[in-house]
């Protein structure tokens, strides 16, 4: 059997003889690693014990076969040559050597039978430990199934709670939206109340103004008369402005003519100055020549 890590906290192994797959879940990856190491140690120890017991059984069977082959010879020899006392009295040193070897073989057979019993006891112990391990693994598999069922139930309950939380969140969002709408409506209501108060004040002012409308009408008539008089004065002033503008245009025209005449005069004056300058230069040259 080989232990395989299928995830960080779960491992499994297969028993091909029992045609069964076992699995264990752990609380941490360290526990899983320790279990895998112990599993490998127990597996190697069981293999080593099995090999040793097999070797001891083979050696004991060989010794028993050899002793079985040699024992008839000794009995045959004793039957032919007589009893041990007779051999001791009539036999030679070869008979004594055969007796010694026969005793050694009996001792080896007894030791091999005791070692076989010992290894059989150890093998039975290993079988019992394997049975306990198997039962423990079966219990662990049952506990894993139980925990799987509990995990599935918890997962379903978690999904239900999540759905309920989502529904409550949606309801909370709708409640918040309704609160915002109510707040907006209350603000709008306050604005309308303030506008109504302003309209009432304006209405009161209009009523007050309506009481003084006759006075305003009389004042309007007087103002209209004053306005007509002012319009007449404005027309007279406009005529005066037109006349002044015409005079200004004439003055501008005269100024432009004067400017052109002044420019022409300055040009003529510049020409005369140049001629005078040339004349002075000529006089200065004549004075130098003399």
Image: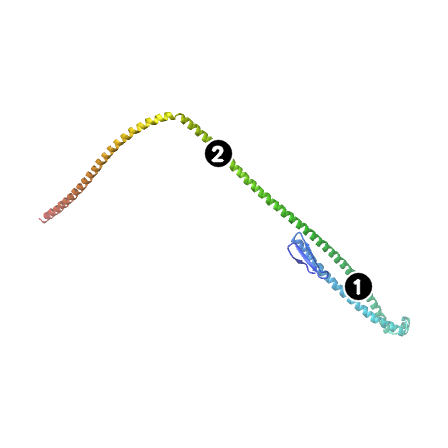
- In the rendered structure, find residue 116 and report the number of the disc placed on it: 1
Q: CA distance from mark 2 to mark 1?
A: 110 Å
- Check the image and name the residue furthest to the left: 290
**SS for callout 1:** helix
Give coordinates of residue 83: x percent, y percent. Answer: 90, 71
Kindly indicate the quadrant of the structure image that contains residue 5: bottom right
Give coordinates of residue 217: x percent, y percent. Answer: 36, 26
Total numbered labels placed on residues in the image? 2
Mark 2 or 1: in front is: 2
The relative height of residue 205 versus residue 155 in the rendered view (above or below) is above
Kindly indicate the quadrant of the structure image that contains residue 123: bottom right
- In the rendered structure, find residue 192 and report the number of the disc placed on it: 2
Of the residues under marks 2 and 1, which one precedes in the sequence? 1
Give me the residue at 59% from left, 44% from top. 167
Q: Is residue 186 left or right of residue 242?
A: right
For this rendering, which residue is in front, 49 or 290?
A: 49
Q: Is residue 81 left or right of residue 138?
A: right
Give me the residue at 69% from left, 53% from top. 145
For this rendering, which residue is in front, 118 or 206?
A: 206
Give me the residue at 37% from left, 25% from top. 214
Kindly indicate the quadrant of the structure image that contains residue 20: bottom right
């Amino acid at each position: 059997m080989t232990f395989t890590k299928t995830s960080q906290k779960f491992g499994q192994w297969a028993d091909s003889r029992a045609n069964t797959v076992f699995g264990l879940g752990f609380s941490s990856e360290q526990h899983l690693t320790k279990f895998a190491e112990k599993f490998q140690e127990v597996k190697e120890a069981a293999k080593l014990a099995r090999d040793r017991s097999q070797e001891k059984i083979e050696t004991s069977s060989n010794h028993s076969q050899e002793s079985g082959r040699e024992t008839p010879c000794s009995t045959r020899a004793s039957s032919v040559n007589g009893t041990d006392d007779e051999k001791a009295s009539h036999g030679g040193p070869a008979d004594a050597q055969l007796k010694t070897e026969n005793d050694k073989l009996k001792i080896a057979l007894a030791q091999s039978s005791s070692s076989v019993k010992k290894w059989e006891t150890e093998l039975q112990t290993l079988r019992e430990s394997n049975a306990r391990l198997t039962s423990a693994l079966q219990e662990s598999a049952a506990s894993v199934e139980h925990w799987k069922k509990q995990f599935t139930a918890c997962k379903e309950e978690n999904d239900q709670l999540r759905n309920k939380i989502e529904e409550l969140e949606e309801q909370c969002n709708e409640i918040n939206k309704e609160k915002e709408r109510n707040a907006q409506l209350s603000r709008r209501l306050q604005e309308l109340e303030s506008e109504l108060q302003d309209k009432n004040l304006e209405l009161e002012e209009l009523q007050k103004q309506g009481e003084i409308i006759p006075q305003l009408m009389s004042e309007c008539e007087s103002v209209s008369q004053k306005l007509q008089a002012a319009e007449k004065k404005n027309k007279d002033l406009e005529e005066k402005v037109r006349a002044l503008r015409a005079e200004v245009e004439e003055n501008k025209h005269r100024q432009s003519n004067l400017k052109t005449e002044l420019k022409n005069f300055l040009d003529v004056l510049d020409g005369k100055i140049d001629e005078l300058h040339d004349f002075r230069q000529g006089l200065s040259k004549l004075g130098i020549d003399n």
